[in-house]
Amino acid sequence: EMKFGDKAGNQPLYVVDGKTIDNFNISNIDPKTIESLNVFKDAKATALYGAKGANGVIVIVTKKNKIPEKTPELQEKKE
């Protein structure tokens, strides 16, 4: 079983689609809906999320909230 957080049982910060979620249980999310999952720990986590990230940060982006890099509506028209 994979465990995150420190030995005192503190949980990492979960960020799902840009929103922090307290008491998040990762087993409640369908793996098929995940576009990407990033784990930040140590100095990187606290640099990005401050004290809330002290026990690590797990950032999940779901497929429904994926933003395409370029869409026809956002591209500038060159004349």
Image (cartoon, rainbow, N blue to C red):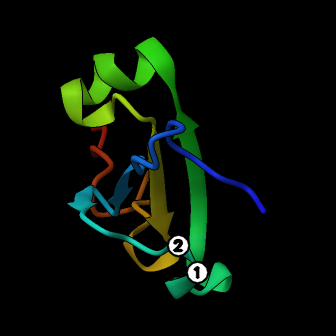
The answer to whether residue 69 is visible is no
Determine the residue positioned at 60% across, 87% down: 30
Q: Which mark is residue 27?
A: 1
Q: Observer-nearest residue: 39 or 71? A: 39
Tags 2 and 1 touching, CB below 8 Å: yes
Figure check: 69 above or below 28: above
Q: Which mark is residue 48?
A: none
Position of residue 17 in the picture relative to residue 7 (left or right): left
Seen as rendered, the residue at the extreme front is 8
Which image quarter is the N terminus in? bottom right
Figure check: 3 above or below 7: below
Determine the residue positioned at 39% across, 60% down: 67
Determine the residue positioned at 21% across, 24% down: 50
Q: Observer-nearest residue: 48 or 51? A: 51
The answer to whether residue 40 is visible is yes
Circle 1 residues within 10 Å: few <14, some 14–19, many ≥20: few
Disc 1 is placed on an element classified as helix
- Residue 16 drawn at (x, y percent): 36, 63
Disc 2 is placed on an element classified as helix
Q: Amino acid at mark 2?
A: Ile
Position of residue 32 in the picture relative to residue 29 (left or right): right
Position of residue 50 in the picture relative to residue 9 (left or right): left
- Residue 4 drawn at (x, y percent): 57, 47
Determine the CA span between mark 2 and mark 1: 4 Å
Q: Amino acid at mark 1?
A: Ser
Q: Which mark is residue 26?
A: 2
Circle 2 residues within 10 Å: few <14, some 14–19, many ≥20: few
Which image quarter is the C terminus in? top left
> How many discs appear?
2
Q: Observer-nearest residue: 8 or 14? A: 8
Determine the residue positioned at 25% across, 30% down: 49
When asked about the image quadrant of residue 56, the answer is top left
